[in-house]
Amino acid sequence: MIHGNGKAQQSPRKRIVVVGGSAAGPKVAARARRLDEQAEIVIIQKAPDLSMASCGYPYYVGGVFDNRNLLLTTPAGVVRDPSFYLKAKGIVARTEAEATSIDRAKKTVTVLDLKTQTQEELAYDKLILATGATPKLPPIPGIRLEGVTTLQSMQDADFLRRVRDEKKTKKAVIVGGGLIGIETCEALHLAGIDITIVELLPQILTFLDWQLAKLVELHIRSKGANVILDNGIAEFLGQDGRLVGVKLANGTELECDLAVVAIGVNPNTQLARDAGLQIGKTGGILVDKFMQTSDPDIYAAGDCVETTNIITGEQAYAPYGDLANLQGRVAGENAVEGDTATFPGTIQTGICKIFDYAAGSTGLSESAARAAFPDGVETVLNASLDKPGFMDGQLLVTKLVVERSGGRILGAQCIGPGDVSKQIAIWAMAIKGNLTVEDMANADLPYAPPFSLAIDHSIATAHIMQNKLTGRMKGISAVEVKRKLDAGEKPFFLDARGPDEYEQARLGIGEHLIPLGALRGRLNELPADKDAEIICFCKISLRGYEAARALMGRGWTNVKVMEGAIAAWPYPREK
Ligand SMILES: Cc1cc2nc3c(=O)[nH]c(=O)nc-3n(C[C@H](O)[C@H](O)[C@H](O)COP(=O)(O)OP(=O)(O)OC[C@H]3O[C@@H](n4cnc5c(N)ncnc54)[C@H](O)[C@@H]3O)c2cc1C
């Protein structure tokens, strides 16, 4: 056997058994094979398919592509079936085979062949659990009715794709406004189905703070889908065993012939629990940085494990496809070479697409950051284009969260039709590298008009944060502005845009239109009391900031800038 150090060693042929054959499992097996040509590697997979790109299900359901096999193929177009695994990788992959128990003392796994119902014991030297997750299914009356489904397995995707193709379904309810619920909403809406999302919490997409989530919600509504918040499903209503509607907790009844339950997933840990392996605080299998369980001969990876949040040091459950692959790679290496590779944990980076918007986040949200760093968090909201207007630049709204002392980046969220993925990737690496606002303020990022502004949106966000941290800018969020309005306060609102823009869109909060270019000649229209509260804004807040600086330079002492301005206003507008 050739080990990673290049030395040839005489050792018996090792048997590596991998339970689970979707994302993490095949990654474990492939990595193990690349490091050990001699090992016997067996994948035990309960589902009929292997290596399913589950993250692609919503796009198959929505008709972005029609060939189901594309969910299962290599980049070269070969379907990853048992024959592919055997021929291309020398890996035995057994589908429709379920690992039903582990005997740790004997180092065997019991495998049930689901086609023949025969059982056998398979010995292992190293066992890797990659059993994934199962969707949460609350015990709501009627949940077993025909027409109630999840979108977790390939069979679910097949079912929903049939629903799309048959064009008989008219109304659907999506239960849960998380990542999968939102992606399913778009997929079924593209199929011409009337959609209502029902979410128990006061907002969708809880990886975002409220304001950004609200902006995404407004975008969803603008496409004709309905969103009901602060409400749960009390009952699925049926007729002759088929779903005909849902009853909400507040008594409202909605007609529908399809319901997709997407309220999150639970780590699939039964096998591990039965074998006496340690389970973590969040319910996932407990593993160390080597992806090793409490049994040194058993590793685990993917949605079935618990990991560590690198920023807080707390245990976290992070069921993401990228992490499943990264963890699988580490577990595969360690199963072959001993504990050499490590997986340090997660910063909870995620992204999803919803119609013309993307929504992503990395690190801590404001609420999570305030809980972890009670006295020392600052936030800023920036709205601007991703590219110049002449290159069809699209809006991005970013919220940045930093530690007030020292300016360490703790989290970032970004939404909009612009290139959200790039922004989140930049901030993810800033967080992993322990970078500060100061580092980001002079980041040397690639620039040409087709790709970004000369000062990239991320860098501009860091600049605004710098201005806030140094006291050059006093920011106020739209949420605080609304609170003031609701409390009957009457700050002087200065809208620094041009008259044309004012005619096209306006908040209607009693604002005074004084275009930035005219401001210095119209100072007499501002409050005579130099301590009066003045809140400046424009479309995205650059002109609002410049207006604020001009007023501060002329003696007004209580001037604020509404962060994100009209572009990030999450409430109804006059126009
Ligand atoms: C619709 C959808 C969209 C998603 N989109 C994204 C996205 O955009 N980005 C992202 O990062 N993540 C996304 N995810 C999450 C991502 O798909 C998962 O994190 C990833 O698939 C986890 O991989 P896994 O191998 O750990 O588990 P799974 O993919 O759940 O695979 C586990 C496999 O183990 C098998 N198994 C279970 N128990 C046994 C047993 N006892 N014996 C044998 N086999 C067993 C199951 O049959 C299953 O196929 C999405 C998930 C879904 C469902």
Image: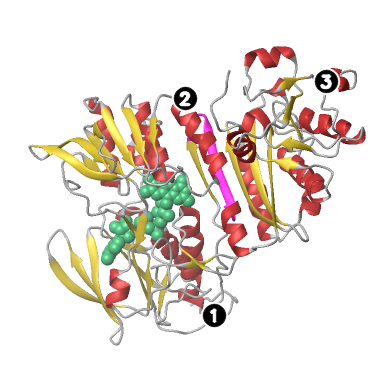
Residue 159 visible in this rendered orientation of the protein? no
Measured in 3D between alpha carbons, the distance from the residue under mark 1 to the one under mark 2, in whole angstroms, is 64 Å
Q: Which residues are magenta?
A: 354-365
Helix, strand or loop at label 3? It is helix
Alpha-carbon neighbours of circle 1 within 10 Å: few (<14), some, or many (≥20)? Answer: few
Q: Earlier in the sequence, mark 1 or mark 3?
A: 1
User: Residue 8: which disc?
Assistant: 1
Residue 97 image offset from top left, x and y in percent: 23, 62
Q: Is residue 416 above or below residue 377?
A: above
Left or right, 136 with respect to 120, comes to right
Residue 401 image offset from top left, x and y in percent: 66, 52
In depth, the one of 513 and 87 nearer the eye is 513
User: Residue 525: which disc?
Assistant: 3
Alpha-carbon neighbours of circle 2 within 10 Å: few (<14), some, or many (≥20)? Answer: few
Left or right, 122 with respect to 559, comes to left
Measured in 3D between alpha carbons, the distance from the residue under mark 2 to the one under mark 3, in whole angstroms, is 37 Å
Q: Is residue 39 above or below residue 444?
A: below
Q: Earlier in the sequence, mark 2 or mark 3?
A: 2
Q: Is residue 506 above or below residue 131?
A: above
The residue labelled by disc 2 is 222
Q: Is residue 495 above or below residue 341?
A: above
Q: State the residue at coordinates (67%, 35%).
A: 564
